Amino acid sequence: MRNGSYPPEREEATLRIEEAHPGGRTLDTEALRALLTRAAAGEDVTLRWLTVVLAGRERVLRLNREHLGHDYPTDVLAFPFAEKGSVVAGEVYVDLDTAAERHEEFGATPEQEARRYALHGLLHLAGYRDKTDAGRRRMRALEDRYLSAAASPDDDA
């Protein structure tokens, strides 16, 4: 996580996507930006300050250990910077290695799987929880809805 402060000095909304995978894995950042923007609008939340970090397994694992006390890998982490109702402010870390390894299990491309992770993180920042079966089903249904609406011809490649 960053050592920056929230709220940022300026008031305009920001959505940053940082490509930080050590092996150079990446995503179509414009498609990801469009997906997250549409999902935020669909959930009636304002993206005040969101950074999505496209990272590798080691970084996500380290953050999971250091900040959540979980000594196991995960596909996505979401860190809220403020609880402000309908305003999203935080960081989402997406493990591109896990997306590349597990996408076939879900009938997806690595890009589609990584987009799902980023969307999942955004939904957490918007207040959704997946600690129960009902919560997991609700989040999965929302992910499916937004991903289906955002599907592009490249997703079939």
Image (cartoon, rainbow, N blue to C red):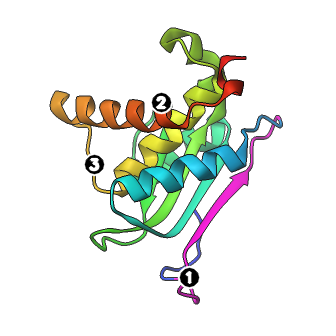
Q: Position of residue 106 (x, y in %)?
A: 49, 14
Foreground tag (1 vs 2):
2
Q: What residue is disc 3 on?
A: 128
| Residue 13 forms part of the magenta stretch | yes
How packed mark 1 is, by other alpha carbons closer than 10 Å (few <14, some 14-19, many 20 or more), is few
* Magenta-highlighted residues: 8-23
In percent of the image, x 44 and y 50: which residue is there? 39
Foreground tag (3 vs 1):
1
The answer to whether 79 is drawn above or below residue 11 in the figure is above
In percent of the image, x 35 and y 50: which residue is there? 124
Q: For the N terminus, give its image quadrant.
A: bottom right
The secondary element bearing badge 2 is classed as helix
Asked if the residue at tag 2 contacts the one at tag 3, i.e. Cβ–Cβ closer than 8 Å, the answer is no
Mark closer to the chain start, 3 or 1: 1
What amino acid is found at the position of numbered circle 2 in the picture? Ser
Q: Position of residue 120 (x, y in %)?
A: 42, 41
Q: Position of residue 12 (x, y in %)?
A: 56, 82
| Position of residue 108 in the picture relative to residue 67 (left or right) | right
